[in-house]
Image (spheres, helix red, strand yellow):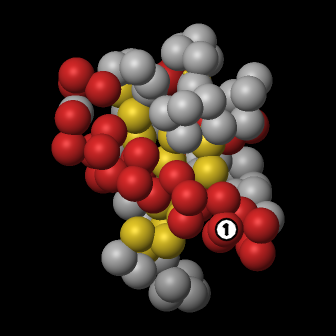
Amino acid sequence: MSHVILDKCLGEVYASCVDVCPVECIHPVDYKGEKFMIIDPDVCIDCGVCLPECPIGAIVGSVDESPDWAKINHELTPASKDYEAKNGKAPPRPPNDPPHKPTNKLVK
Ligand code: SF4
Ligand code: SF4
């Protein structure tokens, strides 16, 4: 079993979850052209530390809560390690207030 990151995380860049994981099993990846984070299910120790760190509730505490996204986390794990090797870890950032979703538009 492991914790799982859901589709709510798609397009987000805040990686406060990455910063707290004691076993460094949360990795950035591109998923269908959007930024995403996945949890490597083989390394996650189910400590639960990341859960309260996600400002939008994109992490669930068990595979049973989202079998579909658990499968996607698992399938994307090799790609995420390649992505991280090329691009580095996602930088931890505090959530904006609002909007949470980053925008490419310049605010004037
Ligand atoms: S539950 Fe613990 S080990 Fe698993 S991803 Fe979250 S912080 Fe890392
Ligand atoms: S803190 Fe939440 S939204 Fe941010 S990268 Fe982690 S799972 Fe995704």
Query: Residue type at mark 1?
Result: Asp
How busy is the neighbourhood of tag 1: few (under 14 within 10 Å), some, or many (20 plus)?
Answer: some
Task: Give the residue drawn at x 58%, y 26%.
Answer: 44
Residue 6 placement, left or right of 101:
left
Q: Residue at x 49, y 87 (%)?
A: 105
Nearer the observer, 26 or 54: 26
Q: Quadrant of residue 98?
A: bottom left
**Residue at screen point 21% across, 35% down:** 67
Q: Is residue 19 visible?
A: yes
Q: Would you place residue 45 above or below residue 83 in this image?
A: above
**Residue 59, picture quadrant:** top left
Q: Residue pushed farthest top?
A: 47
Q: Is residue 6 above or below residue 43?
A: below
Name the spot of residue 33 as percent of width and height, x first.
41, 80
* Tally of numbered tags: 1
Quadrant (top left, top right, bottom left, bottom right) of the N terminus: top left
Question: In this rendering, does residue 58 appear at all?
Answer: no
Residue 45 lies in quadrant: top right
* Residue carrying label 1: 82
Quadrant holding ligand 1?
Answer: top right
| Left or right: 29 as drawn, with respect to 98 | right
User: From the viewer's perspective, is 87 left or right of 66?
Assistant: right
Seen at 36% across and 26% down, the residue is: 60
Quadrant in which the C terminus appears: bottom right
Towards the viewer: 9 or 64: 64
- Ligand 2 closer than 8 Å to the CB at disc 1? no
Residue 92 position, x and y percent, is 73, 49
Q: Secondary structure at mark 1?
A: helix
Does 88 sit left or right of 17 as displayed? right
Tell which of 16 and 24 is nearer to you: 24
Q: Nearer the viewer, residue 29 or 16?
A: 29
